[in-house]
Image (cartoon, rainbow, N blue to C red):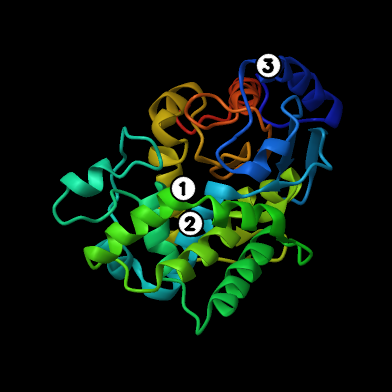
Amino acid sequence: MVSHCKSNEELQELVDVAKTYTKQGKVADYIPALKQARRDDLSVAISYPDGKGYCAGDVSDKLTLQSISKVLTLAMALLEKGEEHVFSYVGKEPTGDPFNSIAKLETNTPSKPLNPMINAGALTVTHMIVGKSVDERFSRILQFVRDMAQNQDIGVNEEIARSEYDSADLNRSLSYFLKQHGVINEDVEDLMELYTKQCAIEMDCKDLARIGCIFAMNGKDVMTEKQIIPEDIARICKTFMVTCGMYNASGEFAINVGIPAKSGVSGGILGAVPGKCGIGIYGAALDDKGNSIAGIKLLEMMAKKYSLSMFNT
């Protein structure tokens, strides 16, 4: 067992094994534009705090953040509104329900989302992002993502954003429920436009790994000594990644892999190994929970080979 990747070739060997699992999954089909993804692709990047990095697989492939963006907007909302405000509108507890479920909103009193990683909670958090217009608010989210990834060329996939907006009836339903109960108070269509653009921010797995490294190093870019986000906000985000980041498979993932991670239905996974490195994975074939099926297998192998689990002693 080693603790540091040594080469791209070493990583490629793991990708080749994990890639066989793509045949057991399927690409997301409830967002029409995501159907175009290639099921058999798989890529991974590791970013270390000293600036070194390794990658393997189809690393030129771009992915949209989808639910991975929830971690980033949570960090922004905590920066702008503070912990007390944010958690007066969204809870801190995991849920065994699917990420897009409305069930707990109907049974909880008060009717606030259980956590920021389910759709209802993410919509509530995105509602908190400050700005005079949807365009201004989205520009601020995009700039924050660019700063975290240290890549000013990151943009948005307009085709996927439009496809998500046009097919967002379930998220509209969640938003109207939240508005009825005073959790949000803005125009639902404005929130839908902002949220779907946020989810359609596009990057490759190397960008994702750099973001993961910032979280892993307690919000700091070690190379420049710049504190990108406060240490306490990085800690909160990583904790949610452990408890809620892999949808309703988070407990099993914590046992099998043991790193803070957040997945998205595009097939992306953001990993932040505390004090060690960031990991970015893209594999569009999903399991029945909405997680990259080959990506999870790859992370399991990486966790064992490089001793990445935060629960190792």
- Whether residues under marks 2 and 1 lie with C-beta atoms below 8 angstroms apart, the answer is yes
Q: Position of residue 241 (x, y in %)?
A: 46, 43
Crowding near the residue tagged with mark 1, few <14, some 14–19, many ≥20 C-alpha atoms within 10 Å: many
Q: Nearer the viewer, mark 2 or mark 3?
A: 3
Crowding near the residue tagged with mark 3, few <14, some 14–19, many ≥20 C-alpha atoms within 10 Å: few
| Relative to 288, 110 lies left or right | left
Q: Position of residue 185 (x, y in %)?
A: 32, 73
Q: Nearer the viewer, residue 97 or 252?
A: 97
Q: Nearer the viewer, mark 3 or mark 1?
A: 3
| Mark 2 to mark 3 CA distance (whole Å) | 35 Å
The residue that appears at 81% across and 24% down in the rendered structure is 12
Tell which circle, 3 or 1, labels the residue nearer the N-terminal end.
Answer: 3
Q: Which mark is residue 120?
A: none
| Mark 2 to mark 1 CA distance (whole Å) | 6 Å
Q: Position of residue 20 (x, y in %)?
A: 72, 14
The amino acid at mark 1 is Lys
- Whether residues under marks 3 and 1 lie with C-beta atoms below 8 angstroms apart, the answer is no
Q: Quadrant of the N terminus?
A: top right
The residue that appears at 39% across and 46% down in the rendered structure is 118
Question: In this rendering, is residue 65 above or below 281?
Answer: below
Q: Position of residue 226 (x, y in %)?
A: 64, 68
Q: In which quarter of the view is residue 267 placed?
A: top right
| Relative to 98, 76 lies left or right | right
Q: Identify residue for label 1.
A: 238
Q: Identify residue for label 3.
A: 23
Question: In this rendering, is residue 158 above or below 46?
Answer: below
Crowding near the residue tagged with mark 2, few <14, some 14–19, many ≥20 C-alpha atoms within 10 Å: many
Specify the farthest residue to the bottom. 132
Q: Nearer the viewer, residue 107 or 294?
A: 107
The residue that appears at 63% across and 20% down in the rendered structure is 301
Q: Nearer the viewer, residue 3 or 10?
A: 10
